Amino acid sequence: MKLSSTIAALALWAVSAACSAQAAGTALPSHPFVSTSGKAQLWMRPDIGEVKFEAGAQDGSSQAAAAQLQELSASVMQLLAEHGVQESDIESYDIEKKTVPVDAEKPAVYSMGRLFHARVRDLAQWPDLVSKLVEKEHITNISSTFDRTDGDDINAQLMAAAADDARNKGSSLAKAFGRKLGRVVAVAPGPLTQVGAPFLELQRGRETRGTAPQSGNFSVPDSIAYSQTVNAIFVLK
């Protein structure tokens, strides 16, 4: 393609982009700008695990069902304590108190449940603890996640690294077109939904911290991913 054709095509693209932005109600900056994104990722070994599960009881008598649930809950608390879980790292909530039908010829029974959420700081205890929870009767919906106690610091460092990556990419783009990178006028941890200056997008972006809740596979992973993504708009000088 000849240079004149290239310039014409670029000019047509710029006009189309401006028209599209105006039609969408998006204000374009009056100054030349470049938009870039940066990413940083790190794999680290987890040092803390969280396990969630439900304890349940059913009986024709509400008092008996409540007593069974209390007994099961006490047994769960003892099991957690035996594996080094502090009481301050345990949360529990009553999640249901209802009657459920058994069959057409028998009266409904009372069903009660309690949700447990425990943070396990000594992962050496994890395999045996989870194994005993799985074997325990009336314990259901077990799920686990893993993280690091210094996860906030890791994500802060990754955010700074992602910002540097975005700036370096912007500098390279500006240099390729004979320009210099100026000040930043818009930043966001996720996609910028609006092009304007000055502008700060507050929506939550792509952030990875720890592992997603999983059930069925409760082994401690060798490493977990942390990542941060930054999108930015810089003025061109």
Image (tube, helix red, strand yellow):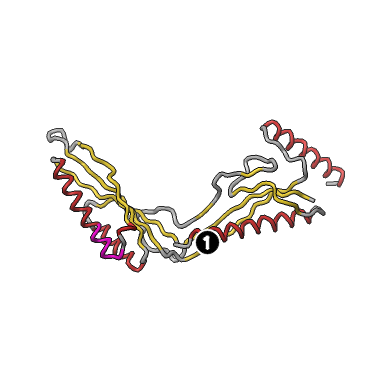
Residue 137, picture quadrant: bottom left
The verdict on residue 79 being magenta is yes
Q: Nearer the viewer, residue 227 or 71?
A: 71
* Count of picture labels: 1
The verdict on residue 183 being magenta is no
Question: Measuring 65% from the left and 52% from the top, which residue is drawn there?
Answer: 37
Residue at the far bottom: name it.
Answer: 124
Reply above or below: 126 against 116. below
Reply above or below: 27 against 113. above
96 lies left or right of 198: left
Residue 124: x and y in percent read: 35, 68
Residue 166: x and y in percent read: 66, 55
Residue at the far front: name it.
Answer: 88
211 lies left or right of 215: right
Question: Measuring 51% from the left and 54% from the top, which residue is drawn there?
Answer: 208
Mark 1 neighbour density, 10 Å: few (under 14) some (14–19) many (20 or more): some
What amino acid type is highlighted by mark number 1? Ile
Element type where label 1 sits in the image: helix
Q: Which residue is mark 1?
A: 154
Question: Measuring 80% from the left and 52% from the top, which residue is drawn there?
Answer: 177
Q: Main secondary structure of the magenta part?
A: helix
Residue 85, picture quadrant: bottom left
The magenta-colored residue range is 77-84
Residue 40, picture quadrant: bottom right
10 lies left or right of 74: right
Residue 130: x and y in percent read: 30, 60
35 lies left or right of 210: right
Residue 151: x and y in percent read: 48, 60
